[in-house]
Image (tube, rainbow, N blue to C red):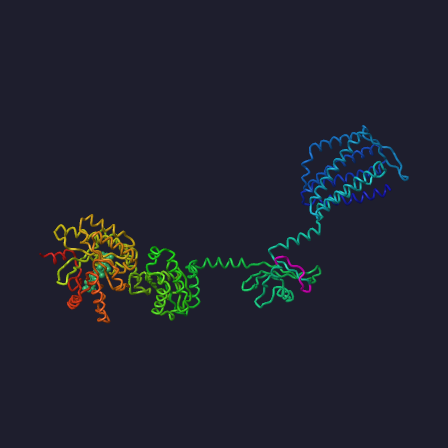
Amino acid sequence: MKLLMGILLALSLAVMVLCLFATHFKEHDLKNLVQNILSIAILIIFNYEIVLFLDDEQWNLFAHSIYFVATDWILYYLLQFSIEYSGSDFNQFVRKKAMIFLLMADSASLLLNTVSGHLFSLYVSDYKGESYYAMSTKPPFYVHYFIIIMLVSFCLISLFYRAFHMPLFYRSKYLAIAVILVIIILANIISFKKAIDFSIIGYSLEGIALYYCTFVFTPQRLLRKTLLLVSQDMTIGLIVLDIEGKLLYSNNFARDLLTSDSTLTDNQGMSFMEWCRKRYFSNEDNAAQDYIFYRGSDKITLNIQFQNLMDSHNNLQGAYFVIYDRTEEINKMKEERFLATHDSLTGLYNKSYFCHVVEGYIKSHTEEELLLLCTNIKDFKMINDLFGSQMGDMILKGCADIIRLKENKAIVYGRLNNDIFALLIRKSDFNENQFMSRMQEIFSSEIENEFSYPLINYIGVYEIIDRSIPVAVMCDRAKLAISKIKGDYHNRVAYYNETLRNDIRYETELISDLDDAIKQKQLKMYLQPQVSSDGKMLGAEALVRWEHPVKGMISPGQFIPVFEKNGLISDVDKYIWETACQQLLAWKKQGRDNLYISVNISPRDFYFLNIYQIFTELVEKYDINPRNLKLEITETAIIMDFQRQMELISKLREYGFSVEMDDFGSGNSSLNMLKDIYVDILKIDMIFLQKAQDEERSKKILQMIISLSKELGMPVITEGVETVEQVQFLTQMGCDMFQGYYFARPMKVEQFEKIYFTD
Ligand code: C2E
Ligand code: CA
Ligand code: CA
């Protein structure tokens, strides 16, 4: 019996030493505790071997003490372990320091027993023919028992407490340790005062169990169930097929793909399940890639990873598909790409993308003759300011619609910025007149209906000859061509060429010279007389001339359109207006306060200046009669913003100014409109006197204008009168006043005075 027990203990001792050794290499929070417990358990077993086989009473007594001390500490560490291992909050009830103190005291008392014998003594006993040392205990020994019972109870409470707060799967882990502990106690009770203490084996079992639970044990069912839960709710689809290609498992995500109301199909109408099966039987290699499927009309992009399942002998077991829905990601990418490459208002390409696409096209179509067109809406900024940006947006969208038209045959088109659109077109496809009239037709029918202002789109054309020039520069050149037409009422298309470049350089020079021109009085006011039908000089129109120190005499036709484009015209006008007032004052002082001067107001001035304020201040400053300052407002300026202009004109007339409608008949106004216009004088444009194709027709119109204004009580002046015949028929028609080369050309003030002040 002794031998059997000895062998059993030796075996378990070997296993535990192995465990202890293995623990050394583990990484775990509880590593130290497990090492302590295993070490003490090894000590207990080794010690018990001594008890079993050593025949010396004194040594045996000492070994017993060691055994009891060791049980104290092994239970202590077990308690620590069970608290830590189970992560229970039980440790808040256990006073660690007090316990260690108690255990130290008990250990000291137990070791002292070897010499004092105050706890127990040994006597030789006999069991089945073999002799053992049996123990006779004294009452103080029960203190040790009490400590043991306390520790065991704490351990058990802690373990059970945790076990029953845990899901079922985890419970076994805690219960295993608790049960072994109970077995040790029971064995201890059974073998109490018996010859052989079977509980010793329990310690080795407990040590090994701890090792197993801590480092080896993972509940398989738990693992399976957990994996299943994880895979069910993943946002990635998982489909597993068995060896015959039947569906073995699919998670929630994949089930949606397989069995939704509107089925998912590939481009040949094959259902998703069939598709998976076909892929499985296709014997193709494992791979992951994007596939397109359809749900109704919706396009779905799935990234599918296919993998054959092999067992350890490399035999096919089935296959699985890992499916990742990339639809949203791809749509988002497309949307982002769209936003980065398109203009948000019109949906056309933006500038950088337009240039990029054009560049690609130019490079790959070297044999084609190509044009780059830019369009620009006349006075768009002003329209935007006057009618609001909502209206502006509407016009831009309309413009984009025109650009998009198939008939335009544009290869690439886009919106560069603001009201500037660009097109790439084959030279052979571009018919200037057709293109313009189509554009103007749609412009007037689609947009003007909602909007009474006449819209005009200018076009600048750049012919692509040198293909190495950056597309952005080509666009700039086409735009430059447009800047040349602005202000020219008859021309709407301009081609970029070297002359244009020179013109533009010339314009730039004019712009930079203007400041000096005003300061150095290079701008001169010329006067052209206005005469009555009997030839009497009534007054004069002020016409500006630029006596440039280098470029010589520049006529207003050359620089006014340039300054009208950028608003500098207002500086010129203010200067001439003031000069005119100074002249009127000078004449007044000479007693000639019956003469008047007509000054021109550019349509742009209404936009940049407070006309009413400027003129009233001027007449007050120079103390002249407003009646002597006539204001020429062009027909275009009036139509552009009819209501406001009429209000302004009526205010100016109320103050005493005489208002003339200049260039009547050159713009878009109708005769009909005359009755709504209240001005002092109507100035008929010289266009009717110029050699017209149909002279008779021009004369008829002239006659109608003159008759109508007579009826409305408005005096008429005709400008551009060059011949005596013109004077005659105009007089017959009832024209009151004339202005033109027939009477006199515009001239310097001194000359004017010399000719007309001869009295
Ligand atoms: P406009 O106001 O219609 O002025 C009449 C133009 O016709 C003047 O040209 C004048 O010289 C010209 N003219 C006069 N009689 C005859 C004629 O019998 N036959 C022909 N063929 N032409 C005649 P000019 O001085 O070159 O001015 C051109 C335009 O420049 C003016 O047209 C006016 O719109 C503008 N302009 C001139 N001075 C000023 C100014 O100080 N301010 C503004 N805003 N515009 C001005
Ligand atoms: Ca004029
Ligand atoms: Ca005129």
Percent coordinates x, y for residue 454 in the rendering: 32, 62
Q: Is residue 549 left or right of residue 167?
A: left
Q: Where does residue 257 sit, x and y in percent of width and height?
A: 60, 61
The quadrant of the image that shows the N terminus is top right
| Residue drawn at 38 percent across, 71 percent down | 428
Residue for point 18% across, 55% down: 597
Q: Is residue 251 magenta?
A: yes
**Can residue 551 be seen by looking at this rendering?**
no
* Residue at 79% over, 44% down: 12
Q: Quadrant of residue 360?
A: bottom left
Q: How many marks?
A: 0
Q: Say above or below: 456 vs 629.
A: below
Nearer to me, 15 or 698: 698
- 704 or 668: nearer the viewer: 704
537 relative to 205, above or below: below
Q: Which quarter holds ligand 2?
A: bottom left
Stretch of the chain drawn in magenta: 243-253
Q: Looking at the image, which residue sits at the far left?
A: 759
* Relative height, residue 365 to residue 416 (above, below): below
